[in-house]
């Protein structure tokens, strides 16, 4: 059921995803083609905000903070998984893998590689602070517009 808390949570996490995506870009080699990197991450932020953060609002500010933190963890997981899968598909079209099992295993290797690049203090700060703020704002929206 659509609520104001879900809408606010979706918008907030989409903004966090966009800022984190912009902070990650300089960590990759120069000339990297990002394609729809930001768009995919923003859509994931909207979905995670709507289904995870927004659905859990209305339980108090401490819960809102922990829900924001949990939502950012979920957003990071799904973003890494989707981006790694996208890279695996691109490599598969270039005949990089010998078998489907090797390609599926590469999703996790690529995800770990991308995750290591995300261990930058700026990216971590954006995700943590943004997630906590998103949780608090979603909680305020949930209490204000019931």
Image (cartoon, grey):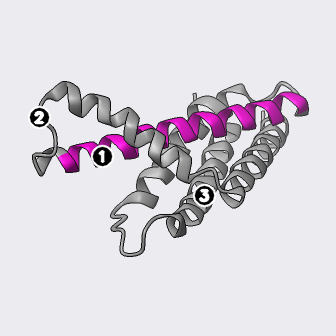
For the C terminus, the quadrant is top right
Residue 117 seen anywhere in this rendered image of the structure: yes
Badge 3 local density, few (<14 within 10 Å), some, or many (20+)? many
Is most of the magenta stretch helix, strand or loop? helix
Q: State which tag comes first along the sequence, 3 or 2.
A: 3
> Seen in the image, is 26 located left or right of residue 88?
right
Q: Secondary structure at mark 2?
A: loop
Q: Quadrant of residue 19?
A: bottom right
Q: Residue at x 10, y 46 (%)?
A: 95
Residue drawn at x 60%, y 58% is 20
Dot 3 falls on a residue whose secondary structure is helix
Q: Mark 2 Cα within 10 Å, few/some/many (few <14, many 20+)?
A: few
Which residue is drawn at the image coordinates 84% and 42% (left, top)? 140
Q: State the count of labels.
A: 3
Closer-to-camera residue (144/104)? 104
Task: Measuring from the top left, give residue 78's x and y in whole percent.
Answer: 48, 37
Residue linked to disc 3: 20
Label 1 to label 2: alpha-carbon separation? 18 Å
Indicate whether 108 appears above or below 125. above
**Is the C-beta separation of discs 1 and 2 under 8 Å?**
no
Expressed as whole percent of the image width and height from the top left, the position of residue 114 reads: 47, 48
Q: Separation of disc 3 and disc 2 at Cα?
A: 34 Å
Q: Any mark on residue 98, and which?
A: 2
Residue extent of the magenta highlight? 62-91
Alpha carbon distance from label 1 to label 3: 18 Å
Is residue 30 placed above or below 61 in the rendered structure?
below
Which residue is identified by label 1?
86
**First in sequence: mark 1 or mark 3?**
3
**Helix, strand or loop for disc 1:** helix
């Amino acid at each position: 059921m659509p609520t104001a808390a879900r809408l606010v949570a979706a918008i907030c996490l989409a903004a966090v995803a966009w800022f984190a995506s912009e902070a990650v870009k300089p960590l990759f080699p120069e000339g990297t083609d990002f394609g729809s990197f930001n768009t995919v991450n923003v859509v994931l932020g909207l979905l995670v905000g709507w289904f995870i953060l927004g659905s859990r609002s209305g339980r108090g500010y401490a819960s809102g903070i922990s829900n924001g933190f949990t939502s950012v963890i979920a957003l990071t997981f799904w973003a890494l998984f989707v981006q790694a899968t996208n890279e695996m598909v691109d490599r598969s079209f270039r005949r990089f893998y010998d078998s489907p099992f090797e390609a599926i295993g590469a999703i996790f290797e690529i995800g770990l590689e991308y995750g290591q690049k995300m261990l930058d203090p700026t990216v971590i700060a954006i995700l943590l602070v943004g997630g906590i703020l998103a949780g608090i704002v979603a909680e305020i929206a949930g209490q204000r517009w019931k």
